[in-house]
Amino acid sequence: MKEGIQTTKLIFEEKKASVLFLWLFNLIFFSWDIFYYYFRPYFNGASLNDLRGGLGIWVYLLLVGVLILAIYYIKAGNIYIVKYLYIISFLIIDIMDNLVRYMGSTEHFATGNIVEVLLILFTPIFVNKRYFWTVTIGLIGKDLLLGLILGDLNVLMPVLIYITISALAYILLIRFYSYINSLTKVYDELRQKEKLAVIGQMAAAIGHEIRNPLSSLRGFTQLQQERYPNTNDYYPIMIQEIDRINSIVNDLMYIGKPRVIHFEKASIEEIIAYTLSITQQQAERQGVIVETTMAGPLPPLDCDEKQLKQVFINLIKNAIESMHESGRIKIKVNVLEKTKMSVSIKDEGCGIPDENILNIGEPFFTTKSSGTGLGLMVTNQIIKEHLGELNISSELGKGTRVEVVLPIIHRQRK
Ligand code: ADP
Ligand code: MG
C-alpha cells in the first residue's frame, strides 16, 4: 500500500517535470527560431525569400508531431518515455536539417541552438543519470559527427561550451541525488522510530501487567520451596524460568524507550568479572573457555553499571550461543586514545551471514529457535545512551568480533 502511494507520487513528479519540459522546450525552440530566422534577418535588411533553409517548414511539422506523440504518452501513463522521445527526435531532426542545409553549400556550419542548452540544463530536473548521459553524449556526439561530415572545425566551440554546461548539470544532478538519498534516509529512520514507539508503548503496557503477577508467582514458589525443602527438585528450575520471563519482559519494555541512566564511576574489571560469573554456568555446559585480557591498570569508567552489565551479559551470551561445540571466547579491554575504553568479545562461532548484518539489532530479529531478538536491540540502546559505539565484524563459519567503545569520561548531552 505504502509502496503504491510512493510510486504514484514519483510518477506525479515525473509528470510535472515532463509537462514543464514540454512547455519550455517548445516555447524556447519556436521563439528562438522566429527570432533567429525571421526577425534578425528582417532587421538586418535581408530579403524574406531565403529564410530558414534546411528542412524548412518540415522541422515545425515534425516537432508538432513529436509534441502530439508526447501528449499521447503522458495521457496513456507512459511518462518516463517522453524525455527520451524528445531528445532522440530532436537529434534526428537536427542532423537531417543541418545536412540538408549545409551539404554542398559553402556556408559556414553554425550550430549551438539555445534549445540544446535547455536540454542539458534540464537533465538534473529528471534526476536520472541515464537520461543525463543520453542527452550530453547525444548532443556532443551530434555536433562532432556533423563537424566531421561537413569538414568544419566551427563545431569545437559549441562542443566545449556543452561540455562545461554538462559538467555543471552533472554537479547539480549529483547534489539532487545525494539530497534525495538523505531525505529518504531521514524518512526511513523516522518511520522506524515511530514503529518502535508504538511497539514500545504496547510492550510497556503488557510488560507492566505481566510483572506484577510474575513477582507474586516467584514469591509463592520460593515460599513453597522453603516450606517443603525435600519434596520437589523442580523449585529452583521454576524460579529460574520465572526469572527468565522477567528478564524478557524487562527487555521488551526497553523497546523504543530510553531509560533513565545514572552515571557513576565504575570499574570495568568488576563489571566484566560479574558478567562472567553470570554466564559461567552456560559456558561450562557448552564447553566454552573464556579468556580475558586487560591492558594494564584501567581508569574508572563513567557509566551506569547495571546497564553495562546487561550489555556484556547479552554479548557474551550471544558469543556462547554462536558456538555449538566447545570453543574459545577472547575478551580484551583496552584504552583507546586515552579517552575511550574498548571492550572486544571475539568468538569462534558460526558467524553472521551478510544478509543478516543489517537486521541485527532490530527488535525481534533472531535466528535462534528460543531467541527473543531483543538482546542486541537493548545492547545498542544502552550503548547509544552512553554515547558509545558498537562495531560488529564477522566471518561466516569462523567467528564474530563485537567491540564496544565507550567514552571514559561522560559529558552531559546537550
Ligand atoms: P537473540 O540472541 O535472542 O537471538 P540478539 O539480539 O541477541 O537476539 O541477537 C540477534 C541475532 O544476531 C541472533 O539471533 C544471531 O543470529 C545474531 N548474532 C548475535 N551475536 C552473534 C554472534 N556472536 N555470532 C553469531 N551470530 C550472532
Ligand atoms: Mg542474544
Image (tube, rainbow, N blue to C red):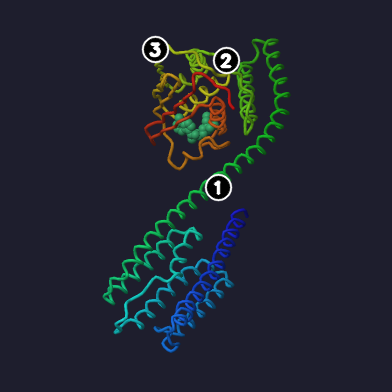
Mark 1 vs mark 2: give the one in front: 1
Pointer 1 residue: 183
Quadrant of res 46: bottom left
User: What type is the residue that disc 1 sits on?
Assistant: Leu
Residue at image x 69%, y 31%? Answer: 204
Q: Earlier in the sequence, mark 2 or mark 3?
A: 2
Instruction: Using the image as rendered, state which of residue 404 and residue 263 is in the foreground.
Output: 263
State how far apart marks 2 and 3 are (Cα): 22 Å
SS assignment at label 2:
strand
Q: Residues within 10 Å of mark 1 (few under 14, many from 20)?
A: few
Is 114 located above or below residue 357 in the figure? below
Give the farthest residue toward the left.
Answer: 151
Residue at image x 44%, y 28%? Answer: 402
User: What type is the residue that disc 3 sits on?
Assistant: Gly
Residue 139 % position (x, y): 38, 68
User: What type is the residue that disc 2 sits on?
Assistant: Glu
Residue at image x 68%, y 11%? Answer: 228
Quadrant of res 297: top left
Pointer 3 residue: 296
Pointer 2 residue: 264
SS assignment at label 1:
helix
Q: Contact, CB < 8 Å: mark 2 with mark 3?
A: no
Q: Which mark is residue 123?
A: none
Mark 3 vs mark 1: give the one in front: 1
Residue 14 % position (x, y): 55, 63
Is residue 153 left or right of 47 when viewed as pictured?
left
Is 79 located above or below residue 360 in the figure? below
Is residue 217 left or right of 270 when viewed as pictured?
right
State how far apart marks 1 and 2 are (Cα): 38 Å
Q: Earlier in the sequence, mark 1 or mark 2?
A: 1
